[in-house]
Amino acid sequence: MNGEHQYRLRATWTGDRGAGTTGYRDYDRSVSLEVDGKPLLEASADTPFRGDPAKWNPEELLLGALSECHLLSYLYACVKVGVVVVGYEDEASGTLVEDGKGGGAFTEVTLRPRVVVADESMVEAARAAHRQAREWCFIANSVNFPVLHEPEVVAA
């Protein structure tokens, strides 16, 4: 399944309070994210950047994309080697460092998946499948910072 895949998303700023961007404190950071055929996602800046804490922010969306991509790649890797996954949770975290000039960047993300497999005999192969998932994860392969993994695998 080689090929090129295109993605489309419509981001609309919804934070005009009537004065536009006349000043840093004069506008809301609210944004709606839309993909045809899917529910609208309400987003904003993170709270330290005058955002709405009740809405998703870009940093959380990036972290979510990395976590979900690894999860989906991992499930496929397990299928390929005969590991039956019956549970998966990830407690992902990331560090963003501001540069003092108004910008910044993530310096690393750590994924902490806790995987439950059907049988004790599958535990070692399930651990190894994380390495393959890392190689296959489109999102992790697209970022310029380390995506670390601290997996735990247990039998049901």
Image (cartoon, rainbow, N blue to C red):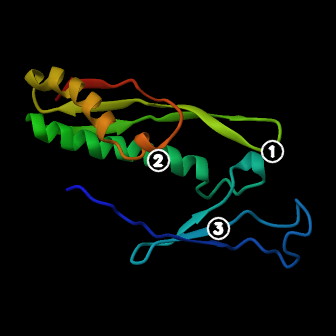
Which residue is label 3 attached to? 31
Judged by depth in the image, the label closer to the viewer, 2 or 1, is: 1
Q: In what element is the residue under mark 2?
A: helix
Taking the image as shown, residue 49 lies to the left or right of residue 121, namely right
**Nearer to us in this view, 69 or 151:** 69
Q: Amino acid at mark 1?
A: Gly
Q: In what element is the residue under mark 1?
A: loop
Which residue is label 2 attached to? 64
Q: Indicate whether 152 appears above or below 139.
A: above
- Where's the C terminus, which quadrant? top left
Q: Quadrant of residue 33?
A: bottom right
Taking the image as shown, residue 105 lies to the left or right of residue 78, namely right
Query: Which comes before the other along the chain, label 3 or label 2?
Result: 3
Kindly check if marks 2 and 1 are in contact, taking CB atoms under 8 A apart as contact. no
Q: CA distance from mark 3 to mark 2?
A: 18 Å
Q: Quadrant of residue 99?
A: top right
Q: Residue at x 42, y 66 (%)?
A: 7
**Nearer to us in this view, 31 or 143:** 143
Q: Amino acid at mark 2?
A: Gly
Query: Which comes before the other along the chain, label 1 or label 3?
Result: 3
Query: Which comes before the other along the chain, label 2 or label 1?
Result: 2
Q: CA distance from mark 2 to mark 1?
A: 24 Å
Q: Residue at x 41, y 73 (%)?
A: 38
Q: Residue 88: x and y, percent? A: 29, 38
Judged by depth in the image, the label closer to the viewer, 1 or 3, is: 1
Which residue is label 1 attached to? 102
